[in-house]
């Protein structure tokens, strides 16, 4: 279709009218240099943004939350410690309730997978990374094996919702198709894309241009899950399926205890609207979010916002006062997400100063040597204070958390570190099942073979010994 010159002039006038009240007309500075296709692409990007909302965010002063003051009166959150979580008097009931919820089709799995493997030196979506210590299975395959095995345990198919970002969406869908949806029916997997926020100049508050026809943007954070679920009809689809409880996890943790019945059961026993897993911090300044109760509500204080003197506070027995570290594993009530989705202020934007390449007024690319921009993200844990009832449950990191984040020269959360954590967990299962493993050999167990040590005990003869690296599938 031919786009006429008058049409392009009208389009520019409409875009100018949209941008002018917010001082962002420079977005159209290169309009006369662009061809028709480039103009259409820029126009689609401009009209897709909620400029009044973004203007309020851009102009709000940074650091609006005084975390230092709040943290000074923070208490340990209401939580089940590891011993309490596994209390033999309550654990069978929790397992039964969680299992019934899964069996009745009331549980869904949301997997957040919008990140690239940049820090790993991997130029594809992180979910593609071949992390299996023996099999080389990708993170995505591990997650799908786990949720499929959990569904099979209770005779159902647990619906899966995978959130991508604009950087990873097309590649992820293509990958799933090439892998035949990992044995899932396509209708039971929905892949949806999170939103983006423009990057702005840290001094002028003007939107940066990545190219003459493109605004510089970044994903709006894992907190963007809520808005994306609404925009793409995820909550509506869940309601149609009868889903009431949503198990949420992130792609970089291959030890994720996907849809664990015990966790869902404790969530139900407490009538919690939002339940979170936590690890016990090993040192005060560990780089994890900190669960804390402040004025009767549970919050997560980012490690970068927690004053050192508060991080070091200890109880009379010497344990850390704020001991519970967030690992981005949650169980939500669908009704809670529907209620909070209607609140414009449910999830505030956090700001971070970053180096963002841009084009200057002459259209020349600039790669800054120091932070020049502010990026905006939402965090899903900011829903916690809005929950009428919430719960934190401790998990042993050795059994539930090994995040793949870093490349060399880091010592932890690297490929080798994560593979070792996976193999070590499976070896512990083997020992509990009465088996043994040759020194130095690796062990990997597909969840479809055994979901835990108890299941492994039923599958292997007592005294089983593996003399070399083994993958059980």
Image (spheres, grey):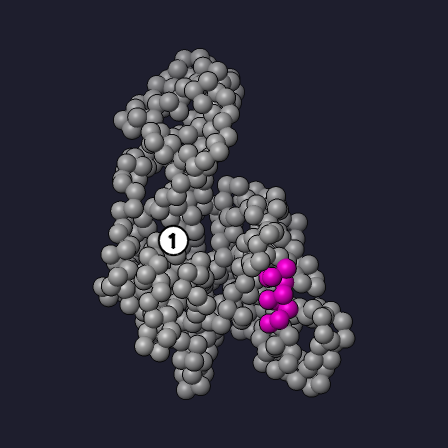
268, above or below 237, in the image? below
Quadrant in the picture for the C terminus: bottom right
Residue 466 position by quadrant: bottom right
Residue at coordinates 69% horizontally, 86% vertically from top-left? 462
Answer whether residue 243 is visible to the viewer in this image: no
358, above or below 427, in the image? above
Tag 1 residue: 304
Find the residue positioned furthest to the top. 5
Residue 207 position by quadrant: top left
Residue at coordinates 38% horizontally, 38% vertically from top-left? 374
Query: Quick check: 190 left or right of 178?
Result: left
Residue at coordinates 36% horizontally, 65% vertically from top-left? 312
x, y percentage for residue 27?
39, 24
Is residue 424 shown in magenta?
yes
The residue lying toward the viewer, choosing from 40 and 424, is 424
Residue at coordinates 52% horizontally, 52% vertically from top-left? 113
The residue lying toward the viewer, choosing from 190 and 224, is 224
x, y percentage for residue 448?
63, 69
Is residue 386 shown in magenta?
no
x, y percentage for residue 386?
28, 59
Dominant SS type (magenta): helix
Q: Secondary structure at mark 1?
A: loop
Find the residue positioned furthest to the left. 295
Q: Which residues are magenta?
A: 416-425
Answer whether residue 221 is visible to the viewer in this image: yes
Query: Quick check: 283 left or right of 293?
Result: right
């Amino acid at each position: 279709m031919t786009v006429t010159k008058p049409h392009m002039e009208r389009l520019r006038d409409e875009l100018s009218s949209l941008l002018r009240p917010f001082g962002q007309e420079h977005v159209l500075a290169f309009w006369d240099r662009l061809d028709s296709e480039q103009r259409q692409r820029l126009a689609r990007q401009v009209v897709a943004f909620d400029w009044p909302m973004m203007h309020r965010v851009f102009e709000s002063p940074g650091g609006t939350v005084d975390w230092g003051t709040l943290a000074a009166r923070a208490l340990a959150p209401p939580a089940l410690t590891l011993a309490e979580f596994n209390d033999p008097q309550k654990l069978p009931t929790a397992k039964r309730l969680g299992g019934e919820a899964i069996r009745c089709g009331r549980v869904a799995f949301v997997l957040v997978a919008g990140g690239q493997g940049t820090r790993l030196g991997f130029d594809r979506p992180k979910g593609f990374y071949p992390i299996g210590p023996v099999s080389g299975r990708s993170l995505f395959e591990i997650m799908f094996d786990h949720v499929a095995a959990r569904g099979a345990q209770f005779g159902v198919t647990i619906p899966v919702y995978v959130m991508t970002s604009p950087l990873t969406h097309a590649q992820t869908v293509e990958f799933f198709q090439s892998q035949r949806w990992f044995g899932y029916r396509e209708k039971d997997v929905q892949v949806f894309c999170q939103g983006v926020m423009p990057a702005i100049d840290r001094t002028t508050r003007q939107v940066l241009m990545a190219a003459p026809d493109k605004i510089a943007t970044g994903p709006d954070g894992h907190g963007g899950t809520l808005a994306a679920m609404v925009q793409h009809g995820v909550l509506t689809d869940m309601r149609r399926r009868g889903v009431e409880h949503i198990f949420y996890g992130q792609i970089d943790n291959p030890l994720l205890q996907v849809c664990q019945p015990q966790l869902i059961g404790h969530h139900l026993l407490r009538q919690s609207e939002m339940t979170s897993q936590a690890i016990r911090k090993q040192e005060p300044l560990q780089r994890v979010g900190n669960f804390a109760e402040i004025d009767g509500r549970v919050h997560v204080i980012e490690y970068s916002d927690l004053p050192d003197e508060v991080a070091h506070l200890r109880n009379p027995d010497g344990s850390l006062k704020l001991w519970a570290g967030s690992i981005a594993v949650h169980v939500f009530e669908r009704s809670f997400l529907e209620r909070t989705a209607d609140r414009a202020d449910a999830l505030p934007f956090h700001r971070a100063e970053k180096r963002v390449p841009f084009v200057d007024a002459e259209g020349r690319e600039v790669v800054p040597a120091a932070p020049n921009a502010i990026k905006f993200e939402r965090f899903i844990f900011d829903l916690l204070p809005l929950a009428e009832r919430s719960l934190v449950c401790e998990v042993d990191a050795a059994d539930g958390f090994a995040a793949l984040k870093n490349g060399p020269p880091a010592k932890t959360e690297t490929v080798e570190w994560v593979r070792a954590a996976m193999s070590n967990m499976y070896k512990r299962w083997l020992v509990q099942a009465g088996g043994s493993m040759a020194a130095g050999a690796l062990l990997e167990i597909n969840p479809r073979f055994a979901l835990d040590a108890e299941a492994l005990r039923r599958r292997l003869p007592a005294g089983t010994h593996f003399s070399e690296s083994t993958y059980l599938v």
